[in-house]
């Protein structure tokens, strides 16, 4: 699975920064129309994309090379700087920030969301190499595990 980068990442980064710098700005007690609008822009020189490639029978596709992939951002091809298989001992440590939506609109799916998030982290993180943090958000943003 390839995760969206620019707009989604910028949105979550903005939410984290707003929550850290102005915790009251994300309070459910305030009128959303009164929350100041801010634009946060940043340059990102390298983005790690962790994904799984499966064949038609839903088995791992083996032997893939960097040339077998095309990464697009805003419909524009991006240069792949580094390519490695995590199962082949990549030296690049991962740092993952997982945001979990706990708002009322997904209450019925929350257990599935928790199980899926845990499976993802167990399947991707390598002991003593990678790091992750979990953030819960609804009307407020809370760090659950750093």
Image: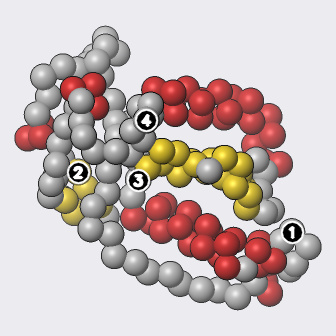
Identity of the residue furthest to the right in this view: 29
Q: Where 126 falls versus 25 (above or below)?
A: above
Which quadrant is the N terminus positioned in?
Answer: top left
Residue 104's x, y, as percent? 83, 48
Contact (Cβ within 8 Å) of mark 4 with mark 1:
no
Q: How is the image coloured?
A: secondary structure
- Mark positioned earlier in the residue sequence (1 or 2): 1
Left or right: residue 17 compared with residue 66: right
- SS at mark 4 in the image: loop
Residue 13's x, y, as percent? 53, 67
The nearer-to-camera label among 4 and 1 is 4
Residue designated by label 1:
28
Measure how far apart labels 1 and 2 are at the Cα level.
38 Å
Left or right: residue 102 compared with residue 81: right
Mark sitting on residue 128: 4
The nearer-to-camera label among 4 and 2 is 4
Residue designated by label 2:
71
Q: Residue at x 12, y 40 (%)?
A: 66
Residue 69 visible in this rendered orientation of the protein: no
Measure how far apart labels 3 and 2 are at the Cα level.
10 Å
Q: Where 86 falls versus 77 (above or below)?
A: above
Q: Where 85 falls versus 22 (above or below)?
A: above
Q: Where 111 falls versus 34 (above or below)?
A: above
Residue designated by label 3:
4
Labels in figure, total: 4
Q: Quadrant of residue 78?
A: bottom left
- SS at mark 1 in the image: loop
Q: Residue at x 25, y 55 (%)?
A: 72
């Amino acid at each position: 699975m390839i995760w969206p980068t620019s707009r989604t990442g910028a949105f979550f980064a903005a939410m984290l920064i707003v929550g850290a710098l102005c915790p009251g700005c994300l309070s459910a007690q305030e009128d959303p129309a009164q929350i100041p609008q801010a634009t946060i822009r940043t340059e990102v020189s390298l983005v790690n994309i962790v994904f799984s490639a499966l064949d038609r029978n839903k088995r791992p596709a083996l032997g893939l090379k960097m040339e077998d992939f095309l990464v697009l951002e805003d419909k524009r091809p991006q240069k792949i700087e580094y390519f490695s298989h995590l199962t082949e001992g990549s030296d690049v440590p991962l740092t993952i920030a997982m945001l979990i939506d706990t708002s009322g609109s997904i209450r019925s799916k929350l257990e599935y969301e928790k199980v899926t998030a845990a499976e993802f982290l167990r399947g991707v993180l390598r002991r003593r190499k990678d790091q992750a943090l979990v953030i819960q958000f609804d009307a407020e943003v809370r760090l659950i595990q750093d």
